[in-house]
Amino acid sequence: MQIQTNASLRSHHTFSIEQSCDMLVEASSIEDIQQVYSNPDWQAMPKLMLGKGSNMLFIEPFQGLVILNKLRGTTVTESEHYWHLHVASGEDWPNFVRWSVEQGYFGLENLALIPGCVGSAPIQNIGAYGKELKDVCEYVDVLELNSFEVKRLSAEECQFGYRDSIFKHALYEKVVIVAVGFKLEKKWQPHIEYGPLKAFDANTVSAKEVFEQVCQVRMEKLPDPTVTGNAGSFFKNPVISELQYQQLLAQYPNLVAYAVEGGMKLAAGWLIDNCQLKGLTLGGAQVHPNQALVLVNQGHATAQDVVDLADHVRQTVWQKYGIELEHEVRFMGKTQETNLLELRGALK
Ligand code: FAD
Ligand code: EPU
C-alpha cells in the first residue's frame, strides 16, 4: 500500500483546485481498506474514500486520510436472458461502459462518458440521457466498517432515487462500496426518448450508435475536466409541486420542466440561465458560458471562489423564483463533509 503524507489533492479531483490532505493512501484490495480502517495509529483520523473526485469540492485542507480506490477486476457470467457483470469498485466508469459496448454487453450506453469510478456510481445513482444506474444495477457489495464483513445489498435495498441512495443516508460513512453487480438484458432495447437521441429509429438503431451519440453530445455540451476544472452539474434539478409549477409557468411560459413522481422536475440550468448568470465570474470561478448548471475553475479559482459563486447562484434563483437549489457536488471541509447551508446560512 502506497502512503504519502501532506499530499496534494489537485490531481485527485476534477475541479483542479490546489488542496492538501494529511495522508493519502492507495487501496488495491479489500484487505488494504480493512487495514486503513483498523490501524490503531489512524483510528482518530477522519477518513475519506475517494474515486476520481469528479463530484467533490475540497473547501479546506483535509486534516485526515484520503483513500484512493484502486480495486480492479471484472467478471462476466450469464443466465438465460441476462449478462451478469461483477465489477470492482475502483474500475473507471467511462472505460467500463466503452468496454461493455465493445463486448456486446448492451444497456449501459446512455451512461457513457460520466467521469468517476464504478463504485461511486450507486452513491448518487448516476443518470443521463433517460437512464439511471438503478435501471441496470443488480446488487452492490459493501464492506461494513464496524464488522469488516462484505455484505451484498440488492438494488431495492439501495433505495435509489434521483441523485440519491441509502449511501447518502442510513449507510453514510458506515460502508465502503467494493463492487457493483450489473444485470444486462441479452435482448437489447434502445432507450432513445431523451432529447438528442429522439432522432434515432428504434427499429434500426444499434447500441454502438447510441453510445457514440451520447459521447458526442456530452463532449459538445459539457466542459472537459482535463481542460477546465469542473464537477459536472453543480446543482440538482429541483422537484416542485404541480401547483407551484403552474404559478411559475404563468410567469415564465418558456420554463423547462418534466413530469416526475411527486411533481415537476425543473431544469435548474434554465432557471440559472434565465437569471442571466451564464458567464458570470467571481474570482477564478465562472458559471459556464454554455451550460449554466456547471460551475468551472478558469484556472486560478480557489474553493472560496466556487463557494461564493455557488451561493450567489443559489441566492439569485431563490429571489427570482422562490426555489431553493440544492447542490449535487459534495463539499469536503477540514474534517467532515459540509454544505452551502452550513457555510453561508439559510436563504432569506
Ligand atoms: P468521487 O467524487 O470520488 O466521490 C463522490 C462521493 O462518493 C464522495 O462522498 C466519496 O467519499 C464517496 N465515495 C467514493 N467512492 C466510494 C466507495 N467506494 N465507497 C463509499 N463511498 C465512496 N453525474 C451524473 O449522475 N450524471 C452525469 O451525467 C454526470 N456528468 C458529469 C460530467 C462531468 C464533466 C463531471 C466532472 C461530473 C459528472 N457527474 C455526473 C458527476 C460524477 O461523475 C458522478 O457523481 C460520479 O459517480 C462520481 O464518481 P467519482 O469516482 O469521481 O466519485
Ligand atoms: N438549459 C438552459 N440553459 C442552460 C442549460 C440548460 O436553458 O444553460 C436547458 C436546456 O435547454 C434543456 C434543459 O435546460 O432544455 C436541460 O438541460 P440538459 O439536457 O443539458 O440537462 P441538465 O438538466 O442540465 C441533466 C443532468 C446531467 C445529465 C444531463 C443529461 C442533473 C443535475 N444533471 O443536466 O448530469 O448529464 O441531464 O441527461 O440532473 C451531473 O449530474 O453532473 C450531470 C452532468
Image (spheres, helix red, strand yellow):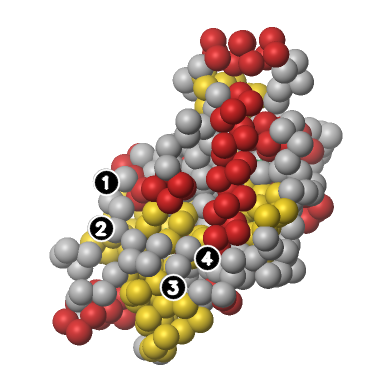
Q: Is residue 305 above or below residue 260?
A: below
**Cβ of mark 1 under 8 A from ligand 1:** no
Instruction: Tell us which disc is closer to us: 4 or 3.
Output: 3
In contact (CB < 8 Å): disc 3 and disc 2 = no
Of residue 141 and residue 67, the one placed in the foreground of this image is 67
x and y, in percent, of residue 276 in the image: 76, 36
Q: CA distance from mark 1 to mark 2?
A: 8 Å
Q: Which mark is residue 61?
A: 3
Q: Which of the 4 quarters of the picture holds residue 242? A: top right
The residue type indicated by label 2 comes to Lys
In contact (CB < 8 Å): disc 4 and disc 3 = no
Q: Which mark is residue 170?
A: 1
**Cβ of mark 4 under 8 A from ligand 1:** yes
Earlier residue among tags 3 and 1: 3
Which element carries disc 4, helix, strand or loop? loop
x and y, in percent, of residue 53 in the image: 52, 65
Q: Residues within 10 Å of mark 3 (few under 14, many from 20)?
A: some
Of residue 75 and residue 298, the one placed in the foreground of this image is 298
Earlier residue among tags 4 and 2: 4
Q: In the rendered image, which residue does mark 4 sit on?
A: 53
Which element carries disc 1, helix, strand or loop? loop
Earlier residue among tags 4 and 1: 4
